[in-house]
Image: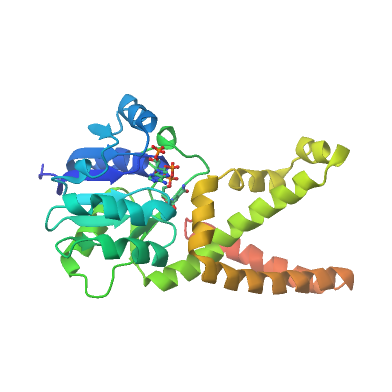
Amino acid sequence: MSAPAFRRLALIGIGLIGGSIALAARRAGIAAEIVAATRSAETAATAMRLKLVDRCDTDVAGVCAGADLVIVCTPVGACGETARLIAPSLQPGCIVSDVGSVKQAVIRDMAPHLPAHVHFVPAHPVAGTENSGPEAGFAELFDGRWCILTPLPGTPVEPVDRLEAFWKALGSHVERLDAADHDRILAITSHLPHLIAYTIVGTADDLGGHLNSEVLRFAAGGFRDFTRIAASDPTMWRDVFMNNREAVLEVLQRFQEDLFYLQRAIRWGEGDKLFDLFTRTRDIRRALIHLKQA
Ligand code: NAP
């Protein structure tokens, strides 16, 4: 058996994504040692109890010493401050990455703090659940899912290739994208759907009175699926919208126009317009199933 590709993997933040990376990395045997640091002593104790990593404490800087791969797994809004804290302990040649759902803002916030002797390769595993915290992590989370790398221009090929091999070992398919393209694509495929789910569940809750309890009592397929999405972590999603503002506002504008088109079709009894759209969208769902992404 060949030696692990990384000597020491350090995870900063050990919730759903950090915990899942730890478990998947161990399953793959890709790192000789896996260590982590988190903000609270309570989360660190949980991570140790669950045996997610070999060592976990709250010393964010200390845990990076001797690591050849550091992955920041905190909410997007905390990535800049985390980079500032870990910078002095990063060893030369270390690969520093992240898992943030937004890429341009994370690059803007992290890159200025990182020393020239490390390789910064931002990444986003497009895999998750509505659960958070270390207990939500599981080794299979990334199996068959995409991980998008958004390397900065001028980054040497070798660290990007190594990070790609890391994510493939964790079960992911890997694609490289420009950070701005990533943010535009995710705005429509992930951020807008979450915003819609939060809105629908909020609107239903606002109906008030006896209707409110009836809505919950008869929650059927569509609404129930929205409540699952709307249960996603409030901190994470606040940070996503605060940090992908332009792209989200752009797709939101287009979405509102399309919604008005449907509103008008319903008002004027133009059933053919609804039928045509619903037929087109059903084909998209079938294509997704074909691509094994549903
Ligand atoms: P999570 O389960 O809530 O875990 C967050 C981790 O970050 C915990 O260790 C937490 O520490 C720490 N943390 C929270 N706020 C912090 C702060 N202000 N400063 C420093 N550390 C802080 O979150 P997650 O779902 O793993 O998400 C982590 C990242 O993955 C986010 O950037 C998110 O955009 C990205 N992501 C999430 C998903 C998803 O579906 N959840 C999918 C892809 C990518 P304590 O518990 O000790 O406070």
Give the quarter of the figure containing the N terminus: top left
Is 285 left or right of 177, judged from the image as shown? Answer: right
Farthest-out residue, top? 49
Q: Please report the residue visible at 24 percent of the width from the left and 50 percent of the height from the top.
A: 86
x, y percentage for residue 249?
59, 70
Residue 16's place in the image compared with 42, above or below, is below
* Depth check, front residue: 170 or 12: 12
* Depth check, front residue: 82 or 145: 82
* Depth check, front residue: 69 or 117: 117
x, y percentage for residue 26?
25, 38
Residue 93's place in the image compared with 33, above or below, is below
Q: Please report the residue visible at 38 percent of the width from the left and 61 percent of the height from the top.
A: 106
x, y percentage for residue 131?
50, 39
The quarter holding residue 214 reads top right
Is 54 left or right of 225, judged from the image as shown? Answer: left
Q: Is residue 158 visible?
A: yes
Residue 225's place in the image compared with 193, above or below, is above
Q: Is residue 294 visible?
A: no
Point out the quarter of the image occupied by ligand 1.
top left
Is 278 left or right of 16, judged from the image as shown? Answer: right
Q: Please report the residue visible at 28 percent of the width from the left and 65 percent of the height from the top.
A: 112
Is 61 left or right of 17, judged from the image as shown? Answer: left
x, y percentage for residue 100?
40, 56
